[in-house]
């Protein structure tokens, strides 16, 4: 049996495993739910830690846009995700869900490293819990399988951790016991998700754009969210007629935050030279705007 056949067989097994997991559900589109309340008693707060804030090729002290919610839910996987988690007092083994907004390289560059880290720590009970990897259904399985091949998992099965793959389509809702994530299609050249995450324990709602040109559907999805994390990878002075169809300026993010009536806006995925001018431009439209900073945590409370 050649490596390709082995790989495909293993992959089908993973898909079967994903379908059988009881604590997650997906469903077709439903309207944003701004009234979700905690399903169980617990501290009414949600912590977000940014382990990357930069562009596709990050600097030495930053990483590509990437953040962790409550230490167990990771959004996108920058180059140095596993190492940065350790740097900022987070444990890569405690990540239960890796949610990848889309499969452009900068959003999954750290995936083999994260998987290798978990595989090499397989004796730790935390590593025995399968990592749920969630993202666009058309591209996610290919990238996970390529990571598996990259790590030579057929030859060295011990380096491959327990994972469950869950592909979703824009418009679907993905749910775990702890979170509810509603999605719409981003405006981007590949299938990409704009998302609204509700922390069931705290009731806190966080919306995030992933990579997207200005998307009115995100303004609708994000209505009333406590926080919007929006990309601003295009320079603030780019005129309207020079805007492409792939990304947003800070002023576009600010308009969506204003239209959605969110509590706070955090700009992410900015080149270093554009951080301050982008912040100033956004605050003229939406004053409660901040910049994502690698290593910074914020706590949202009801
Ligand atoms: Zn992208
Ligand atoms: Zn990107």
Image (tube, grey):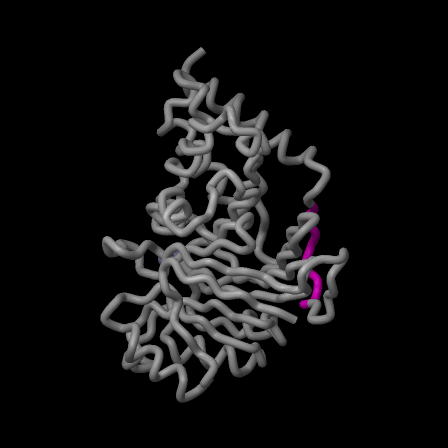
Residue 78 locus on image (x, y percent):
37, 49
Q: Is residue 182 visible?
A: yes
The front one of 63 and 20 is 63
Give the image quarter of residue 261: bottom right
Residue 18 locus on image (x, y percent):
62, 35
Question: Majority secondary structure of the magenta segment?
Answer: loop
Residue 73 locus on image (x, y percent):
54, 50
Kindly identify the residue that appears in the image at 62 percent across and 64 percent down: 45
Q: From this view, report whether residue 87 is shown above or below residue 142.
A: below
The N terminus lies in which quarter of the figure?
A: top left
Q: Quadrant of ligand 2?
A: bottom left
Q: From this view, report whether residue 285 is shown above or below residue 203.
A: below
The front one of 11 and 264 is 264
Q: Is residue 15 magenta?
A: no
Q: Which residues are magenta?
A: 25-32
Residue 174 locus on image (x, y percent):
64, 51
Kindly identify the residue that appears in the image at 62 percent across and 75 percent down: 223
Direction from residue 26 to residue 132 in the image, left or right: left
Q: Residue furthest bottom?
A: 284
The C terminus lies in which quarter of the figure?
A: bottom right
Give the image quarter of residue 126: top right
Kindly identify the residue that appears in the image at 53 percent across and 21 percent down: 9
Give the image quarter of residue 203: bottom right
Q: From this view, report whether residue 179 is shown above or below residue 122.
A: below
Q: Is residue 185 visible?
A: no
Q: Residue furthest top?
A: 1
């Amino acid at each position: 049996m050649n490596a390709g056949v082995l790989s495909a067989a293993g992959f089908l097994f993973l898909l079967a495993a994903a379908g059988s997991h009881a604590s997650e559900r997906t469903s077709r589109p439903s309207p944003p739910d701004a009234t979700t309340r905690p399903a169980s008693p617990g501290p009414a707060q949600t912590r977000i830690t940014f382990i990357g804030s930069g562009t596709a090729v990050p600097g030495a002290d930053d990483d590509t846009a990437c953040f962790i919610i409550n230490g167990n839910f990771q959004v996108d996987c920058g180059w140095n995700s596993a190492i940065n988690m350790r740097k900022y007092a987070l444990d890569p083994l405690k990540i239960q869900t890796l949610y990848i907004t889309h499969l452009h390289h900068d959003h999954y560059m750290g995936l083999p490293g994260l998987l290798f880290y978990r595989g090499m720590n397989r004796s730790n009970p935390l590593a025995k819990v399968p990592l749920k990897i969630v993202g666009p259904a058309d591209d996610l399985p290919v990238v996970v399988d390529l990571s598996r091949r990259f790590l030579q998992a057929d030859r060295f099965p011990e380096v491959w951790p327990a994972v469950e793959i869950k592909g979703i389509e824009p418009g679907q809702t993905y749910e775990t016991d702890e979170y509810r994530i509603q999605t719409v299609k981003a405006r981007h050249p590949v299938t990409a998700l704009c998302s609204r995450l509700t922390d069931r324990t705290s009731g806190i709602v966080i919306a995030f754009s992933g990579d997207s040109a200005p998307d009115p559907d995100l303004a609708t999805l994000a209505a009333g969210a406590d926080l919007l994390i929006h990309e601003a990878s295009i320079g603030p002075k780019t005129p309207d007629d020079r805007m492409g169809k792939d990304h947003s300026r800070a002023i576009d993010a600010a308009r969506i935050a204003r239209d959605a009536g969110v509590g706070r806006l955090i700009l992410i995925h900015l080149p270093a030279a554009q951080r301050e001018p982008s912040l100033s431009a956004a605050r003229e439209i939406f004053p409660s705007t901040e910049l994502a900073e690698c290593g910074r945590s914020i706590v949202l409370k009801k």
